[in-house]
Amino acid sequence: MSKNINLRELKKARTKLLLLQTTLDLIGQGSMKDLHVEDICRKAEISKVTFFNYFSKKEELFCYFMGIWGLHRAVEQHLHPLRGIAGIRRIFHRVAEEDLRSSGVMLNLIRFLAGTDGKPDVPPITDAEKQVLYPEWDDITEWDLPHLYELFRHFLQESVEDGEVTAEMPLETLTLVTISQFYGAFLSGHNGGVADMKMHYDMHLRLLLANPSDSDVGWIIDKNE
């Protein structure tokens, strides 16, 4: 059963999502520092007062983006479950497949995170935002949709249980290593002019495997699909 979300909350959700999409469209291959709130508001046809009702500064849109992108990955896992390394690989490949690479969004996100002290303050995604993004799923507000960090941790736990990944490191350490690969492999691939980012990510994933000489990421993904 879908929740009865009032029109005011749905309107707020649509406005926030519009501001986010407008920002992503405007960044292009440029930098967030060159983009002004006035530019975002003009393109979205929204007043600055309205903008600041949702975000205290433009950089907060990156935290919101992280929450929305993580929601998409959690929905994908809910609808098409994978296990262990296969689940991690799919998340990595989404970075290479989507506009995160071509639009410059991922590089801007990495720059933002590099200048942030501590963990970014990723806001929880509201039921209204879930419904606006996925109107075809009436019961989406009832789904268990974990944060991206929790997804990585869950997949790694399965990987240890299945013997895909070495259990020598604590689970939290493995999770941090995987998050480092998520951002670091993208950056090294970009700086190195790597054409096939999926293969570049797969090369890094092999470093997590318990028996990399006998195992292959492609074989693992085939086993799960």
Image (tube, rainbow, N blue to C red):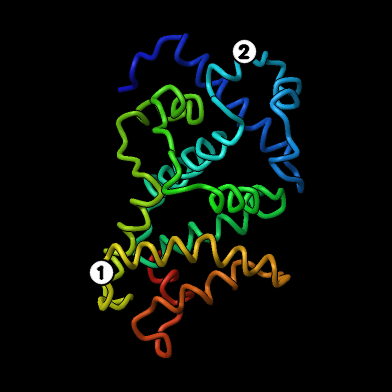
What label does residue 170 carry, if any?
1
Looking at the rendered structure, the secondary structure element under dot 1 is: loop
Q: Earlier in the sequence, mark 2 or mark 1?
A: 2
Looking at the image, residue 200 sits to the left or right of residue 131; the answer is right
Q: Position of residue 8 (x, y in %)?
A: 47, 9
> In the rendered image of this protein, does residue 158 appear above or below residue 24?
below
Q: Residue at x 50, y 39 (%)?
A: 63
Q: How many marks?
A: 2
Mark 2 vs mark 1: give the one in front: 2
What label does residue 49 carry, if any?
2
Three-letter residue code for mark 1? Pro
Farthest residue toward the bottom?
213
Image quadrant containing the C terminus: bottom left
> In the rendered image of this protein, does residue 12 appear above or below residue 203?
above
Q: Residue at x 41, y 10 (%)?
A: 6
Three-letter residue code for mark 2? Val
Image quadrant containing the N terminus: top left
Residue sitting nearer the eye, 21 or 220: 21
Q: Residue at x 38, y 62 (%)?
A: 176
> In the rendered image of this protein, does residue 211 appear above or below residue 204?
below
Q: Position of residue 108 (x, y in %)?
A: 64, 48
Residue sitting nearer the eye, 106 or 78: 106
